[in-house]
Amino acid sequence: MINSNLKNKIINGDSLKELKKIPDGSFDLIFSDPPYNLQLRNRLIRPDRSKVDAVNDKWDQFENFKVYDDFTMNWLSECRRILKKNGSIWVIGSYHNIFRVGTKIQDLGFWILNDVIWNKNNPMPNFRGTRFTNAHETLIWASKDKNSKYTFNYQSLKCLNDDLQMRSTWNLPICNGNERLKENGKKVHSTQKPESLLHRILLASTNKNDLILDPFLGSGTTAVVAKKLGRIFYGIEKDKKYFNAANKRLKNTKPIEDNYLDTIQNNRSKPRIPFGSLVELGVIKPGTEIYDQKKKINAKIMIDGSIKYQEAEGSIHKIAAKILGAESCNGWTYWYYQSGNTLKPIDELRQRLRPNN
């Protein structure tokens, strides 16, 4: 049951103070875009002598590393407390802060699942020419602890990526064009994140009606994407200007119709169906030959659901692994059966036994 005080709301207030008011174990996911502590000492000037609209806001400035580390430890501690036991957290940062943040994440007992590189298709050029162009930011994805049964929508991410496994390098543009919030021709927020980035994060690690927190809401991208995708959001933003911009943006955001929010269910969340069940139920008969995708290898099915390939006998997974010389192999995707003039994966037979198929 979701606390009504946390349901689809954004708060104008200090993050640390507001986090302390939230009950333990409230959120399914936290996305955090904290101050980066960029340490910019000089104004950035383009070759045409125009000023670069860089991040030099007071909220991003800290007296020294210890002050920043203490700040990081405080907000992360609260986030871990209010995260559900099977929840996860994403934190984004640059080389200025992400390694310090990562240390605190591990110190607090979070379990790092991935570091993801957001490779910007259109980064800001390096105008001084004294170092490489900063063309990426790093995201750390971590579960509450190593035993957490966190959400990962593997099949949806694979579908999003043209049926290829989604890798930990994401090529996405920075926020610009009509999506970029502006006031009198100037950026409302210097580090507004693109909706495409949050779309991928929420699709990967949440389900419909999950409760999501952004403790440094900024221009409101997390809440906006959550609203569109049928997730429930709660955001905290200290700066009144940013808060007002996020509020206005949310009011203009329409959720996607509920009919279009369904996603591909992960196989591991579906009822387990052993290959032997297909034999018991007569879906596939003993003695049937099954093949690899190129039909260069064939094996025969035994009465107990095992298969025989040459002199080797075992499960569909064990024999496939033996053929490939691998430690393991998913036999459901390795083996095919003959259906008329075509080969079809045996996994299609399993799908017939699943509910709603």
Image (tube, rainbow, N blue to C red):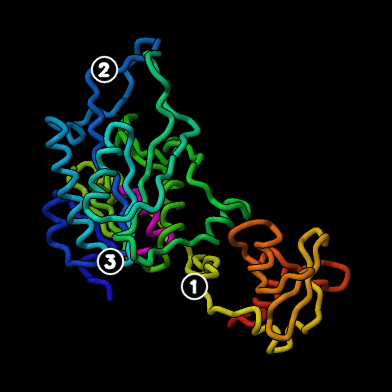
In the image, residue 155 sits, relative to residue 35, either above or below, namely below
Q: Is residue 309 magenta?
A: no
Q: Please state the horizontal and vertical placement of residue 157, each as a whole percent of the image.
A: 53, 56
Query: Residue at 45% across / 57% down in the picture?
Result: 204
Which of the numbered marks, if any, corresponds to residue 43? 2
Relative depth, front residue between 155 and 55? 155
Quarter of the image for the C terminus: give it. Answer: bottom right
Residue 250, can we see it? no
| Residue picked out by circle 1 | 269
Tell me the residue at 68%/85% (across/down): 304
Q: Position of residue 24 (x, y in %)?
A: 19, 67
Between marks 3 and 2 in the image, the one whose residue lies nearer the viewer: 3
Q: Is residue 229 above or below residue 42?
A: below
* Quadrant the N terminus occupies: bottom left
Q: Residues within 10 Å of mark 3 (few under 14, many from 20)?
A: some
Horizontal relation, residue 53 to residue 64: left or right: right
User: Which span is picked out in magenta?
Assistant: 220-232
**Sequence order check, earlier mark of 1 and 3:** 3
Instruction: Report which residue position mark 3 lands on.
Output: 84
Of labels 2 and 1, earlier in sequence is 2
Q: CA distance from mark 2 to mark 1?
A: 52 Å
**Which numbered disc, 3 or 2, marks the residue that appears first in the sequence?**
2
